[in-house]
Amino acid sequence: MRSALLLLLATLVIMLGVLEGASRWIFADVTSTADGTSFFGKRWLRQYEGPLNAHGFREREIEAKPPGVLRVVVVGDSFTYGQGIAREDRLTERLDVILGPAVEVYNFGIFGANYPEHATIMATAIDVAEPDFVILQWYTNDMQPPDAQRGGASYLAGPLHPHLNPHSALYFLANTAFMRVQRAVGLAPTFGDQFAPFHDPKSAEARDARARLERVLDIAREAATPHGIILWPSVGVRVRADDFMGEEALISQVLDVCHDRSLPCLDLRPALRVVPIDDSLTVNQFDTHPNALANQHAAEATARWLRRHLPSLPGQAPGGEAQAVDPRLPSRAFASR
């Protein structure tokens, strides 16, 4: 009996080893996942993240601003940080190339940052970089309160998850399938479900989120630093129509803040709808962050937007700044695209 159990155990270990090796080989081109803590996420960190600067950002060191050079900084979360992509493929680097040597663009993105973290990052960016313009890069999950429980689904291995997820490709694949099943059968909330309480702008959740956003913007206003917001939509496949409509409602609320503050804001939906709503703008099937192509489209739109609001930027058309556009209707700015 004991020999039979040992043989069974040895067989299971060998099978798991073979499956682990096969998983790594089949998904050899996957170098990133959305949470950044998986086996594939750790692979990306080793290969692509690169060194951080003295202030902890995935960026070059902040030097003294050269005379005659405009400096733009971008504050945000993993979309700004560039989860899943190389540094040169991020919006900030693409924007830096488009605007040319008379403009410096610095990246102040932190993976997982929400409004409370944005406030700290905003203050740091203004203090150390002395920018001429600050961009807050917004995405839906920025609205979550600091104590929000993200995800909602149970892990396949329970308390062993933190130990298995970074080291096993097979476990990551099995756990991903397990979590998707939970959401599909209603045992865990979808991404859109988590933001349903925010859809009504008069709800307590939406009002609290707006107050947190305004505290971030107040930091730039009190420092007399020109600033604005660019709003990212989801760029991957939307599983449910309700999620899509919910995101539209949240974007509308932020654009209302822009209007009420007379703040320049750029809705990236028109710029990113140049391709179908599928996975062609995401990093890979396990990471729905914007890929290099999405960042290029966003950078081109952002450069046009900046030239409207910063007349001294190179490339400004003769005659000065373009006519102001109502920030609640930003798609008009791209009508001739």
Image: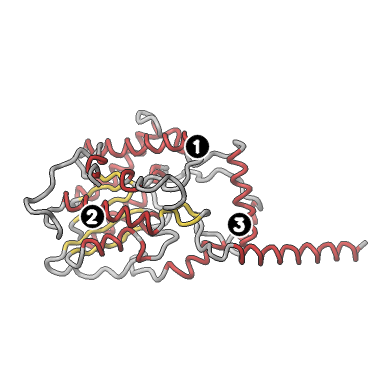
Please tell me whether mark 3 or mark 1 is closer to you in this view.
Answer: 1
Callout 3: few (<14), some (14-19), or many (20+) C-alpha neighbours within 10 Å? many
x and y percent of residue 23 in the render?
A: 63, 62
Residue under label 1? 240
Q: Is residue 127 left or right of residue 139?
A: left
**Can residue 115 be seen in this snapshot?**
no
Q: Residue at x 36, y 52 (%)?
A: 117
**Can residue 229 be seen in this snapshot?**
yes
Asked if residue 331 is positioned above or below residue 200 in the image, the reply reads below
| Local SS, label 2 | helix
Of the two numbered discs 3 and 1 on the same chain, state the one appearing first in sequence: 3
Distance (Cα) linking label 3 and label 1: 24 Å
For badge 3, the amino acid type reads Phe
Q: Residue at x 21, y 45 (%)?
A: 264
Callout 1: few (<14), some (14-19), or many (20+) C-alpha neighbours within 10 Å? few
State which quadrant residue 104 falls in: bottom left
Residue under label 3? 172
x and y percent of residue 238 in the render?
A: 47, 42
Q: Is residue 311 left or right of residue 133?
A: left
| Extreme residue toward the right, this view | 1
Distance (Cα) linking label 2 and label 3: 39 Å
Residue under label 2? 303
State which quadrant residue 141 falls in: top left
Distance (Cα) linking label 1 and label 2: 32 Å
